[in-house]
Amino acid sequence: MRNIQKEIRENLDAIEKKYDVKILLAVESGSRAWGFASPDSDYDVRFIYLHRPEEYLRIDFIKDVIEWQLDEVLDINGWDLRKALLAYGKGNPNVMEWANSPIVYRKADEWDALKEAAMHYFSEKSALCHYYGTANSTLHGFLTGDLIRYKKYFYALRPLLCCRWIERYHSAPPVEFDKLLTMFREPDDVLTPELYASVRELLARKALTEEKNLNPQMPVIIDFIRDECARQKQISNAAPDDHRHDYKELNDAFRKLLEKGV
């Protein structure tokens, strides 16, 4: 039997050797991290890496992405630390999720200080716009027909519950869908008993169904997605700009790391 975890570790070792970099963080970033993988879901491995300090002092361009592997099973690519820190400074929700992934393939000791600095740059405005935009594009692009791929429901449901989390807690939402689902069930005012039961049923079906399969609409879920998208459009548009507009903490953390000569 194929040992995927071992393959991932071996690929990370090979990346470090070939590119002479240190991987600071490597995580799962897709449906497996979110908690609604299908039997044929691939592994979306994302990593953040660091060059030798002298590489950041050169005058010519240093490539800031490593695109390592993309096939039916493994999707592995990574960002240079400077590129990742720039994204954190802008409140990029995708890299925020990398830092909070529940599935960690590799984490260097140096990562904790970097993460602490990065989390100070969480932006409600960026996150709300990102999650609303993802849900809305999924709704109009994949959820309007009579037959639906199960995974597309979750590509709208999870972002919408992330928006609800941000509204209530003003912090980065958890990566795991189940944590969001549990938080907003009755007696809360977000997920009615009927809706909660339907989503649980959908999770059970998806776990046994290949991603390409088409299935009949689930009206109670679609109705919630439509209504919540309309609601989140107004909320995300009205959210004030809360970006930090400075990189001081990130610059300090980056310099300290380079001074260590890692």
Image (spheres, rainbow, N blue to C red):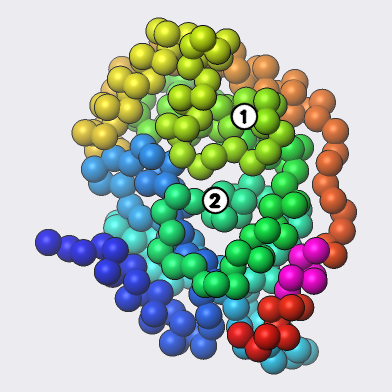
Q: Quadrant of the N terminus?
A: bottom left
Q: Quadrant of residue 254?
A: bottom right
What whole-number distance in Å separates the C-alpha atoms at marks 1 and 2?
15 Å
- Image quadrant in which the C terminus is located: bottom right
- Main secondary structure along the magenta-highlighted residues: helix
In this rendering, position of residue 94 left or right of residue 213? right
Which residue type does callout 1 highlight? Answer: Trp
**Residue 183 inside the magenta-drawn segment:** no
Residues 117 and 22: in front is 117
Classify mark 1: residues with Cα within 10 Å, few (<14), some (14-19) or many (20+).
some
Q: Which residues are magenta?
A: 249-254
Q: Secondary structure at mark 1?
A: helix
Q: Is residue 253 magenta?
A: yes
Q: Position of residue 81 (x, y in %)?
A: 64, 71
Task: Report the label total.
Answer: 2
Residue 214 is at least partly visible in this image: no
Q: Quadrant of residue 4?
A: bottom left
Image spot of residue 131 (x, y percent): 62, 35
Mark 2: which amino acid? Asn
Element at label 2: helix
Tell me the residue at 60%/78% (across/down): 50
Q: Earlier in the sequence, mark 1 or mark 2?
A: 2
Residue 92 visible in the snapshot: yes
In this rendering, would 111 be left or right of 129? left
Q: Is residue 59 above or below residue 173?
A: below
Q: In the rendered image, which residue does mark 2 sit on?
A: 100
Residue plotted at (74% across, 70% down): 253
Q: Nearer the viewer, residue 207 or 118?
A: 118
Q: In the image, residue 20 lies at what x, y percent?
A: 51, 88
Residue that label 1 marks: 165
Residues at circles 1 and 2 in contact by the CB criterion of under 8 Å:
no
How many residues crowd around disc 2 within 10 Å: few (fewer than 14), some, or many (20 or more)? some
